[in-house]
Image (cartoon, helix red, strand yellow):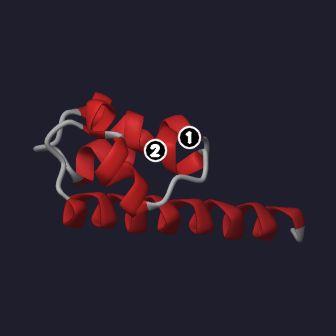
Amino acid sequence: MEQSQSLEFLSKDFSKIDSHLIENLVQLLDEGATTSFITTYQRDKIGPLEENQVILIKNRYNFLKRLSARKEIGRAHV
């Protein structure tokens, strides 16, 4: 699953959150930023997102990445 697909799923799952904020958050997560760093120092990129929202999105994004990796492994063995 490409990042664009993950962003699409996340935007649907968290439809009340502006998609550009989700995109910014995913970019920060891919760069290795921690939840604490993001919620403390990256307010300009995540806007009004609270720490609990960041954690929910992060967990869902990590799930989607793991799911994608498992699908690729399955395809390689077929």
Q: Quadrant of residue 20?
A: top left
Helix, strand or loop at label 1? It is helix
Q: Position of residue 14 (x, y in %)?
A: 21, 51
Q: Residue at x 25, y 54 (%)?
A: 13
The one nearer the camera, 68 or 78, is 68
* Kind of residue at disc 2: Val
Contact between marks 1 and 2 (CB within 8 A): the answer is: yes
Looking at the picture, does residue 78 appear above or below residue 31?
below
User: In the displayed image of the protein, which residue is found farthest to the front?
Assistant: 41
The one nearer the camera, 77 or 14, is 14
Q: Position of residue 42 (x, y in %)?
A: 35, 40
Q: Give the left or right position of residue 15, taking residue 75 as reference.
A: left
Looking at the picture, does residue 32 appear above or below residue 42?
below
Q: Quadrant of residue 52?
A: bottom left
According to the image, label 1 marks what residue? 3
According to the image, label 2 marks what residue? 26
Q: Residue at x 23, y 62 (%)?
A: 51
Q: Position of residue 23 (x, y in %)?
A: 39, 35
* Kind of residue at disc 1: Gln
Count of numbered tags = 2
Q: Give the left or right position of residue 8, taking residue 49 as reference.
A: right
Q: Residue at x 75, y 60 (%)?
A: 72
Q: Give the left or right position of residue 47, taking residue 76 as reference.
A: left
Helix, strand or loop at label 2? It is helix
Badge 2 crowding class, 10 Å Cα cut-off, few under 14, some 14 to 19, many 20 or more, is many
